[in-house]
Image (cartoon, helix red, strand yellow):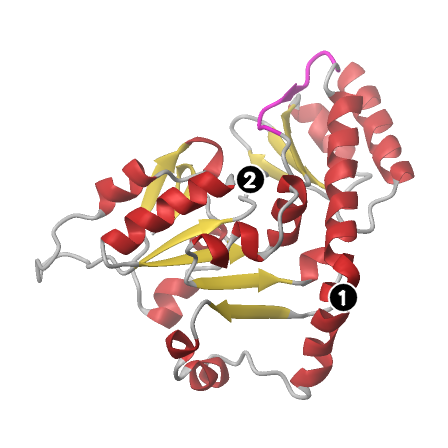
Amino acid sequence: MGGGDLRGSAHLNVDEAGAPEGIASVKLLAAECEHGKLDPAQIDGLIVRRGDEHAVQPRVVSISQSTELGTVYGTEEIAAIAQLVHRQGLLLHMDGARLCNAAAALGETLAGVSTALGVDVLSFGGTKNGLLGAEAVVFATADSADGFQYLRKQSLQLASKMRFLAAQFEALLSDELWRSLADHANQMAARLAALIGDVQGLTITRPVEANAVFATLPEDAVAALQEQFDFYVWDEKRSEVRFMCSWDTTVRDVEQLASAVRDAVGS
């Protein structure tokens, strides 16, 4: 089960072309929650019909840190979820594609926003913080990783010369390079939000807590902006867009986008 805004906007539910069902043969149960963040009560409400052979049996809860909607779980929130999950005999997985951004936003260590709080399995993302094709799976205990090397091979996730990809993590984790890169991305998002937040006809729709800025603006302005910049229209019905800032976003990039937004919405 995974958390998204309204029902099921978590990445593993809507952006993997059905891979969890197709490859892992699992059923995803999506919860309705605000700004992409699950809470223990919502999870508990989905843990039903245990032992009923006619019903899907819950086994893993997945949360995203930071979320697809740019929000960040606080440490107490994750700890509370972990306690509920473990009390129910389940496992807690964290989609940490943007874990560095969340840890930087909270001023915490990487473990301090994940495994130290009770996360059993972590998908630790590297590519969104500057690495080339490098991602890692982190298990909280060695025995929980038993047999994973075979699954990695069977699912085509073992690249030839993997050591060259993996070596990038040594650089990323040395001298807290990950934090400086993520801090920069977060700061660029905050700067962008500050520059466009007062534009008439534009509304920032989500808390800006990491490196994402969500906003609604007129459809014709969206079309004009997409001729110059690459970004997602997150919700076509609401004309809500997502602007993402990254480790290599510059102040000039932000200012150019903000200026174009003002021009497009104003016209």
- Residue 75 placement, left or right of 178: left
Q: 17 or 153, which is in the foreground?
A: 153
Tell me the number on the disc at residue 174. Answer: 1
Residue in the image at 41% along x and 62% along y? 120
Q: Amino acid at mark 2?
A: Val
Task: Say which residue label 2 marks.
Answer: 72
Secondary structure found at label 1: helix
Residue in the image at 82% along x and 28% along y? 258
Query: In this picture, which residue range is highlighted in magenta?
Result: 199-207
- Residue 217 placement, left or right of 143: right
Q: Amino acid at mark 1?
A: Ser
Residue furthest to the top in view is: 200
Q: Check the image and report above or below for 119 versus 261.
A: below
Residue in the image at 64% along x and 27% along y? 215
On the question of residue 258 being in view, the answer is: yes
Q: 102 or 143, which is in the foreground?
A: 143
Image quadrant in which you'd find residue 161: bottom right
Q: Position of residue 117 (x, y in %)?
A: 45, 52
Chief secondary structure of the magenta portion: loop
Q: Looking at the image, do the residues carrying marks 2 and 1 touch, with CB atoms under 8 Å apart?
A: no
On the question of residue 29 being in view, the answer is: no
Q: Position of residue 59 (x, y in %)?
A: 27, 61
Cα separation between marks 2 and 1: 24 Å
- Residue 30 placement, left or right of 145: left
In the picture, the quarter occupied by the C terminus is top right
Q: Position of residue 233 (x, y in %)?
A: 62, 37
Taking the magenta stretch, the answer to whether it contains residue 9 is no
**Which of the marked residues, 2 or 1, is nearer the chain's N terminus?**
2
